[in-house]
Image (cartoon, coloured by chain):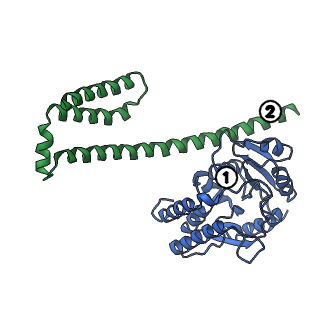
Chain colours: A green, B blue
Amino acid sequence: MIYNFAIIFSVVFILFIINLVRKNKLDEKYSILWLIFGTIILVVSIFPQIIIKVAEWFNVYYPPALLLLFAILVLGTYIVHITITITKQNKMIVKLTQELAILKEKNEKEAKNEKL
Amino acid sequence: MEEKNIKVLVIVPAYNEEESIKNVVDSVIEQDVDVVVINDGSKDKTSENAKKTKASIIDLPCNLGIGGAVQTGYIYAYMNKYDIAIQIDGDGQHDPKYIKEMVQMIKEKKADMVIGSRFVNKTEYKQTFFRKLGINITSIIIKIMTGKKIYDTTSGYRAVNKEIIKYFSENYPYDYPEPDTNMRLILKKKTILEIPVEMKKRETGQSSISPLKSVSYMLKVSLALILNRVKKI
């Protein structure tokens, strides 16, 4: 039952991401990680034995723990990636704000000088 | 003409300082220097009141915080080829009478940056407990990390030469800019001199450091300073 739900969920998730890219609401470069993530969830839900096999390789006693660890690593990495993007964008916004304000001041000054 | 014309710009960052800004700017202009007011997206009449003076006014369309605002002044100084830039707070706590002395020290190449400091000699300035603690902690960290002692690490009253105007126009931290830039300049082997200045209690407005945020401020500024050691600066 839960496997069926997981399959449906991951298919919907992948379609949702593709739709966002299609509508230009999400950049391709950001969608790749989500598509990989969705595909892995899909594969694992169709063949749950994979988890058990991998857990055996890593000597993990409780296989679902491996799944959680994997999810946390992926999400953690993604959040770091997002904060890097925010930092970059913040720098751009500050730069734009500064340049715009300086240009505006220059314009106003020139307009004033022309009047005289 | 014993010296070629040295252009001096005073940068006045102001956020919601409608009551003090006009007096501050007028008293700075008396020192015979160019003044640019950086209005950091104020919600009050800071811009209108500043426009009653002879200063140039740059209105930032949104609030960037002290670092972004002051950097705007340095970019302006760099674009307009100023030789010396001086930062002075818009709230009236810095007395412009020290500008001449600071300019003189930069002109004579005694230092790359001159800081108007509360603590080189004891002045009458009364500190709040947290402010003092913050200054002491940043001062100690800078001393440990660089071996140089800066007494008033958070002073926003400082003068820099042309080379540093260029550096600041390209690199200026948005958060805790004063202690951070002090440390960066020491790491870049620039000389910093502190001169004693008297500071007045803020005439109007609110200090940017509230006691509640102080603990978080100190943790973050300490981390920022320590990371400077490993950063590309």
Q: Residues within 10 Å of mark 1 (few under 14, many from 20)?
A: many
Looking at the rendered image, the quarter that the N terminus of chain B falls into is: bottom right
Is B168 positioned to the left or the right of B92 in the image?
Answer: left
- Residue bearing mark 1: B70
Q: Chain of mark 2?
A: A
Please give the label number shown on residue A111: 2
Furthest toward the bottom, the residue is B121
Vertical placement of residue A41 versus B194, above or below: above
Q: Residues within 10 Å of mark 2 (few under 14, many from 20)?
A: few
Q: Secondary structure at mark 1?
A: helix
Q: Chain of mark 1?
A: B
Q: Is residue B110 visible?
A: no
Q: Amino acid at mark 1?
A: Val
Is B112 positioned to the left or the right of A64 in the image?
Answer: right
Q: Position of residue B143 (x, y in %)?
A: 55, 74
Vertical placement of residue A23 versus B155, above or below: above
Q: Position of residue B78 (x, y in %)?
A: 67, 51
User: Which residue lies at the image location 78% right of the left edge and 61% below the top edge?
Assistant: B93
The picture quadrant where one finds residue B2 is: bottom right
